[in-house]
Amino acid sequence: MKSFVSRRLSSAALTIAVLALLVFWAQRQKSTLGDASFGTGYVLLAAIFFLASYNVRKKLPTLPWASSSDWLQAHIYVALGSAAIFGLHVEWRLPTGIFDSTLAMLYLATFVSGIVGLFWTRSIPARLARVSEEVIYERIPMLRSQLCERAQEAVLETVRSTGSATLGEFYSRQMHGYFEKTRGLGYFLRPNNRVRRRLLAELTEMSRYLSPPEQATCEQLFAMVRRRDDLDFHAALQWRLKAWLFLHIGLTYPLLAVACLHGALAHLFDGGLL
């Protein structure tokens, strides 16, 4: 635990020290009527390049480029520090030109998406661990299909063996859609267990009027309803992480391209690249 805390403290202290030096240098430039925008721009561009390189590091895990956890910590602190560098570069004012405003909006969108992703990657795994065992996202559709088939077979077998259609009619009316269909967008944006609670309550109420074989099948359906809800919960939260990563990376590379173009144009209007 001490190692974990000390590493975070040392990373935060290093980030603050570097930012303090950069602020001091920028103030000195301003006090001597110099222009700090090129210096802060270079540092900010280097930070963006470094942040973008983390995705390359994840695609090449066998290369001896330090551990993935070290890269992640560096990614987080450089990203947080880049917000202060961005503020220094624009002198804490939002740009007014179309091109500069576009670049600023790209940076802010990428930064905010990173903050959201930092929260989600810390909180979602813990929430999933409390639900059930680990489930691979790509296997969820297959597991749902298998669960639907098992539920249908259990109900049909009970109807055939007992000669009573009560459970079969209830399943067809209240539960078939639950097992057959995927949840809507609203559930993926804000997953909840309202449908699960309703189905379990209705199944509990109806089971009082069933025969012992039908009640045994109801017990199976209880477990299957819970299992399906757990799979849907996994699908919703894992989808959230995948959608966030797609958006975050999708913003990073346009930001990098526009930032490079911005730097080139700044040099051209300042008197050339050479």
Image (cartoon, rainbow, N blue to C red):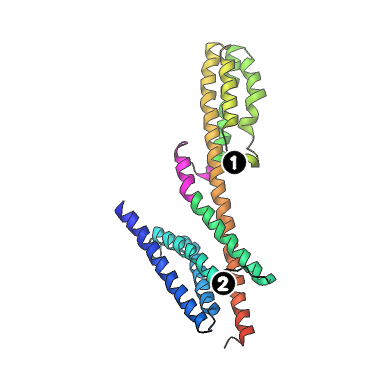
The x, y position of residue 108, in whole percent, is 58, 62
The x, y position of residue 157, in whole percent, is 58, 19
Q: Which residue type does callout 2 highlight? A: Glu
Q: Is residue 202 above or below residue 48?
A: above
**Residue furthest left as drawn:** 2
Left or right? Give the position of 66 relative to 203: left
Can I make out residue 134 in this image? no
Left or right? Give the position of 132 relative to 165: left
The reply to whether the magenta stretch includes residue 157 is no
Is 165 in front, or is 80? 80
**Residue furthest right as drawn:** 98
Q: Name the chief secondary structure element in magenta.
A: helix
Is disc 2 placed on a helix, strand or loop?
A: loop
Is disc 1 placed on a helix, strand or loop?
A: loop
Q: Which residues are magenta?
A: 121-139
Query: In this figure, which residue is indicated by the disc labeled 2?
Result: 91
Residue 190 is marked as 1
Is 231 in front, or is 126? 126
The reply to whether the magenta stretch includes residue 126 is yes
Q: Is residue 224 above or below residue 257?
A: above
